[in-house]
Structures are given as C-alpha cells and as structure tokens.
Image (cartoon, coloured by chain):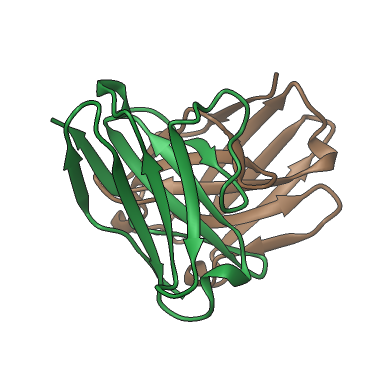
Chain colours: A brown, B green
C-alpha cells in the first residue's frame, strides 16, 4: 500500500527557502507524477506543481520561478523548494500522487513563515 | 479558469445534498473533474475521479456528474450520515495544470 510522508522544518524565516521532502513507500516512484499541494489555515487547496522522475515538472504559474521540485529514486523521495517565502506561504503542505486524480496523500506538514 | 463552489451547504441526516462546481471559462466537459473529501484535521481523500468514477471503497451514496448546460459539475451525497460532515473540493485540469475549487463545507445537521 502506498504511503507518503512529508518532512521538513516547521518554521522558516521570511525571504528564506522552504525545503520539504516526501518519502514514498509501497510503489515505484518512477511510474507516476508526484504533486505538492498546500492549504492555508481555513482556506482551500492550492496546487503548487508536480514532478516526474524522468525530469519533467509542471508548476503553478502563480509561483513564478520561486518553486523547484524533483524526484530522487535512489532515496524514494520527492522534494519541494520554495524560495523567498513570505507570511503568505504559511500553510499545511501535502504531497500526493497524481494518477487519475490525487489518489494518495501524505498527512501534511505545517510550515509557518515567521521571524 | 476558476472553479466556483458554494462556501457551505447543510442538510439533515438521511437526506440528499448536491454540491456544485462551476467552471468560469471553457467547457466543463473538456477535461475531467475530480472530487475530494476532507474531514477536519485530516488530509483530503479522493472521492470521485474522471467526472463520475468512484475509487474502490467509496460508497455508492457518493455520485457525481457534469452538466454542459450550466458548465458545472455536481457531487451528490445521498443518505447523509454524520460522518459525511466535511469539506468537499472539486478539481479539474488545464493542460498540465491542476485547478481546485475553493471548497464547500458540508454540515450534517
């Protein structure tokens, strides 16, 4: 059974880079797109982007050039980097498998941007 | 495009409720619509994929459709149970991009 687990710092300073990883177990990381989705407290879901092992990646234009995602098959991890964060980036961040919908999700990790 | 959902709906146990998801531009039937359930404090789970398909384990009380005339998708939940109280999110595709609606809070009175 597929399991996803997000990890990373819970607190990031403004203007710095948010870095998260998502551990994937129970299925081949090479066969799917893997997405990052976030949710500010009390608000809706926002798709950040998705990455594929073979180098393809698609990002939400709202993030411009701030976001980078990658898939590391040797570690079975998907990573997210979001640069130049502000308080508006405070949210729960989820990783999810993108396969006919987001059919499997991690539990999410809260990231707070504050000095 | 934008997907617009009602902020909240409420209905009594045992009744049927429908949640809409209206696409602002382009045809609703040009790309698939998915639906997710998110219980309080939990990650979302896939409820409906490809407009009206239920993943295994999702009860047939949950159904969905797409209506070209209103350019909207709908999620219908019949035989409402207290555990159906949750947020429901629609999602569609714009090429490689994934777009979510704002979410609807369902209260089971």
Q: How many marks?
A: 0
Which quadrant holds residue B23? Answer: bottom left
Q: Position of residue A42 (x, y in %)?
A: 24, 45
Q: Is residue B31 left or right of residue A12?
A: right
Q: Position of residue B68 (x, y in %)?
A: 49, 72
Identify which residue, A83 or B55, lies in the foreground. Answer: B55
Q: Position of residue B104 (x, y in %)?
A: 29, 49
**Residue B44 visible from this viewpoint:** no
Q: Is residue A83 left or right of residue B38?
A: right
Identify which residue, A62 or A81, lies in the foreground. Answer: A62
Image quadrant where one finds the C terminus of chain B: top left
* Residue at x 61% of width, y 43% of height: B53
User: Is residue B105 shown above or below A84?
Assistant: above
* Residue at x 68% of width, y 40% of height: A78
The residue furthest bottom is B25
**Residue B59 visible from this viewpoint:** yes
* Residue at x 48% of width, y 48% of height: B64
User: Is residue A114 shown above or below A110?
Assistant: below
Q: Is residue B34 left or right of residue B74?
A: right
User: Is residue A61 shown above or below B98?
Assistant: below
Identify which residue, A46 or B63, lies in the foreground. Answer: B63
Which quadrant holds residue B86? Answer: top left
* Residue at x 21% of width, y 26% of height: B13
Q: Is residue A13 left or right of residue A58?
A: left
Q: Position of residue A70 (x, y in %)?
A: 72, 49
Identify which residue, A19 or A60, lies in the foreground. Answer: A60
């Amino acid at each position: 059974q597929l399991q996803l687990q997000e990890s990373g710092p819970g607190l990031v300073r403004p203007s710095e880079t948010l870095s998260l990883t998502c551990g994937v177990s129970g299925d081949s990381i090479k066969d799917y797109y893997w997405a990052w989705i976030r949710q500010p407290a009390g608000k809706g879901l926002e798709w950040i982007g998705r990455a594929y092992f073979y180098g393809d990646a698609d990002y939400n234009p709202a993030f411009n050039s701030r976001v980078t995602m990658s898939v590391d098959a040797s570690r079975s991890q998907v990573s997210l980097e979001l640069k130049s964060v502000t308080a508006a980036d405070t949210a729960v961040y989820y990783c999810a498998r993108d396969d006919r919908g987001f059919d499997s999700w991690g539990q999410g990790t809260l990231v707070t941007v504050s000095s | 495009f934008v997907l617009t959902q009602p902020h909240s709906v409420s209905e009594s146990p045992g009744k049927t409720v429908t949640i809409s998801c209206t696409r602002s531009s382009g045809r609703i039937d040009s790309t698939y619509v998915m639906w997710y359930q998110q219980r309080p404090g939990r990650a979302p789970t896939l409820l409906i994929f490809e407009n009206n398909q239920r993943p295994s384990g999702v009860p047939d009380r949950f159904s969905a459709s797409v209506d070209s005339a209103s350019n909207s998708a709908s999620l219908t939940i019949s035989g409402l149970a207290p555990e159906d109280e949750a947020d429901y999110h629609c999602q569609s595709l714009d090429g490689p991009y994934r777009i979510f609606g704002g979410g609807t809070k369902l209260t089971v009175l």
